[in-house]
Structure formats: C-alpha cells, structure tokens
Image (cartoon, rainbow, N blue to C red):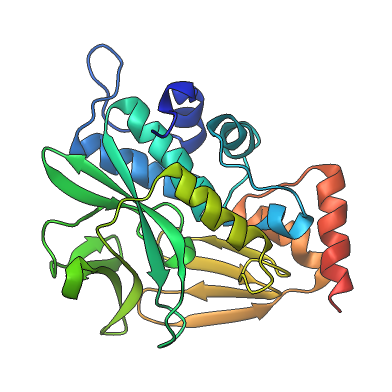
Amino acid sequence: MWSGDQLDLDAYLARIGYDGPVGEDGELRPDLGTLYAVHRAHTGAITFENLDVLLGHPVELGVKALEDKLVHGRRGGYCYEQNSLLAAALERIGFEVSGRGARNRTRGDSLLAVTHAVLVATVDGEPWLCDAGFGHQGPREPVSLARPGAEVAQGEWTYAVREEGDGILVLCMLREGTWRDLYAFSPQRYYPVDYTVLNHYSSSHPRSAFIGQVVVQHPGGPVRRALVGRELTRLYPEGRIERESVAPDELLALLDREFGLRLSGRDAEELARINRAGD
C-alpha cells in the first residue's frame, strides 16, 4: 500500500542515523524494539517544514519523490510527507501499517477539518500510534492505543491517549500539570490516495496554515523549537516558553543553526526574497 518496496531502506536508515536492533542476518525485524528505534531516529533527524509550499513547489507524496527530498536532499516536510515516508519504511521492514486522519485541537474550541495524517502500526496484535509529522509538540516515539488513559513518558515529555464516544481517540500532552489535547482521530482507515487529497488542501488552499508563512518545527529532546512566520519559540518541559523575533536577514542562518536545514542556492535566494517582502 505504501510502496515500501520502492524505498532505498539503507539510505533511509543512514539518513535518520538508525542505531537500533538488527537481526543476526543484518535485517531489521518488525518488532516493538525496531518500531521504537525507527520512530525516534526519524523524528530526531528529519525536521517538520513547509518551505516548498512557500516557494511554490509541488508537494509530491510518491516514495521516490520523498526519498529524493527528505533522504538524499536532507530536507524536511510536513505530515503527509513525513508519515508517508515513515509508512513506506515500516512497510518495507515488515510492519502492518494503516493511515488515519486527525483533527488538530491545539487551536482552541473550534471544530477544524481533518487535515493531519497519522499512522497506526500493529505489533503482535497491538496497535501503536506512529506520528513523525506533528511538529514540535508531537511524540518522539510510538504510543500504544491499546491502553487508553495510560501515561507515557518520553524523556521529559508525557503523553496519553484518551477515548471519547464513537471510537474517537485523542492524543494529549501534559504541560504545566494540565493535559492538553493535540489531535483526535477516528478508527476509519485512510489510504495514500486520501492523503493526496488532504495534501492538495494544505499546500494550496488560502485558508491553510501553511500558506504565506514559514512553518518549521522540531520535537528535539528537552527543548521543542518552532518557527512560525518570524517568531522562534522554544518550549521547555516545565512549561516555560521563550519567544524570539527573527529578522528577515537572519532566516537562512537560523534555519541552518536551529533546524539543520540548508536550501539550494536558488531556493535560498527566493526564500530570503519572500521573507523580506513580508515587511
């Protein structure tokens, strides 16, 4: 389903710096240890970003296009790109992987459309939420869906999945002693063709949050970083938030320093021009 057979798995594993378990034959096993290691390495290495949308480039979800951009080009991407690539890698390793569509709940009480893509991987009959594409607040590791309400510590950050009516599951994050909803998703399976439609909205609709502004984020470790427009935010586990204004001429250096993103000459020039034009 996810075209995992087309993925250069060795190149992907090198890109994310995979250092998890390997079988005696050198192959990865579709077990829980491998799932954790791949997920954590992916979220640690590949930045969440929308720069192609800002630059007017098409956002392609084919495996080879994703490999060229995120693996060989060492760029990042947003949820459809990140999780499509992760799904292909997990499928190639031998995991059972399906998609879900989620509603963002970080923007107040408004009911938002389904615009976020997540994955569910099944290991020994147990479903695990996998998500490499929710930016700086997203989980670094898989979260079990078999034990709603259980707290899951991931380093300095804590998550839980709670259950609502009609089978709706909600991923929550603990901040300053309060559980905050990140997103909600239903049991309905989503397929790559569904993500193609959602991707079209997110990359082109004038109301999309990814249109007209830089959005670059990274879940990191103890510090979560997000650049939206010209504001860099650092989120700390205890709830402290630091905000810093980024001058137009500082953007390219900041993308390299904070997020490990280096654009090609022409794209770098165009991004700098677009950013300056916002004055």
Looking at the picture, how far across and down is residue 4, in whole percent?
42, 28
Q: Residue at x 31, y 84 (%)?
A: 176
Q: Is residue 186 left or right of residue 229?
A: left
Q: Residue at x 58, y 50 (%)?
A: 77
User: In the displayed image of the protein, which residue is found farthest to the top?
Assistant: 25
Report if residue 279 is visible in the image: yes
Q: Which of these two is toward me, 199 or 158?
A: 199
Looking at the picture, how far across and down is residue 106, in whole percent?
43, 78
- How many dots with numbers? 0
Q: Residue at x 46, y 50 (%)?
A: 194
Q: Quadrant of residue 238?
A: bottom left
Looking at the picture, how far across and down is residue 185, in whole percent?
31, 65
Looking at the picture, how far across and down is residue 14, in whole percent?
48, 29
Q: Is residue 53 left or right of residue 84?
A: right
Image quarter where the C terminus lies is bottom right
Q: Which of these two is toward me, 279 or 257?
A: 279
Q: Which of these two is toward me, 33 or 83?
A: 83
Q: Quadrant of residue 173?
A: bottom left
**Residue 127 drawn above or below residue 203:** above
Q: Is residue 135 left or right of residue 178?
A: right
Q: Which of these two is toward me, 162 or 203?
A: 203
Image quarter where the N terminus lies is top left
Q: Residue at x 59, y 62 (%)?
A: 202
Report if residue 78 is visible in the image: no
User: In the displayed image of the protein, which residue is found farthest to the bottom?
Assistant: 109
